[in-house]
Amino acid sequence: MIDDIDRIMAVMALAFDPAFGEAWNRRQVEDAMHFGNCHYGLAAAGCLPPADDAPAAGFFLSRTGFEEEELLLLGVSPAFRKQGLGRYLLEDLRRGASERGAKRLLLEMRRGNPAESLYKAFGFYQIGERRDYYRTQGGDRIDAITFACDIE
């Protein structure tokens, strides 16, 4: 059986552009999983949970706070993009967050992240901005944008 952290790391290796340094290492993911307020979801092709021996095509990692759930990471392998997996994962996140008592979802991303259109289509709206917050591997500075999505 494939370990879920192995599945997450395999997707992360493909989904995150190394130029931006956004991918977490295995230790960061493991440490997050040790806290009771971190949650994850996995998706296989076809917007289904992966079978026991199958790799994942996408994942999310989130953290629960008082009446809020923060999306820490969401990744979909490039071969499976534009097939509804991102929306499937966001629906799974929203469902679980609601069950944990969250009233809204939060996320922060770099300006220019191609996933912005997915988030906006899902109902996220901008609530803040941090100028020059991120630094690329090449030293360029990029703004961070904070988004929220109300859970109904």
Image: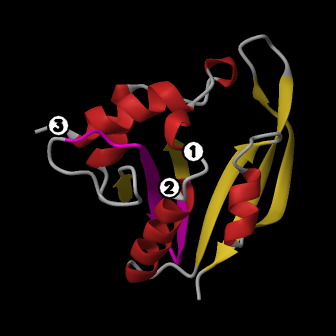
Q: Circle 1 sits in a helix, a strand or a loop, which is it?
A: loop
Q: Amino acid at mark 1?
A: Arg
Tell whether 146 sits left or right of 131: left
Q: Percent position (x, y) of residue 89? A: 47, 60
Q: Which residue is mark 2?
A: 85
Q: Percent position (x, y) of residue 143? A: 85, 39
Report the residue at 55% width, 35% height from top. 78
Q: Nearer the viewer, residue 57 or 132?
A: 57
Q: Is residue 77 visible?
A: no
Q: Amino acid at mark 3?
A: Ile
Residue contact between numbered discs 2 and 1, judged by CB atoms under 8 Å: yes
Figure disc tally: 3
Q: Does residue 11 sit above or below 39 in this rendering?
A: above
How far apart marks 3 and 2 lie (CA) works out to: 20 Å
Q: Earlier in the sequence, mark 3 or mark 1?
A: 3
Q: Amino acid at mark 2?
A: Leu
Q: Which residue is mark 3?
A: 2
How far apart marks 2 and 1 lie (CA) works out to: 7 Å
- Main secondary structure of the magenta stretch: strand
Dividing the image into 4 quarters, which one contains the C terminus? Answer: bottom right
Q: Nearer the viewer, residue 65 or 103?
A: 103
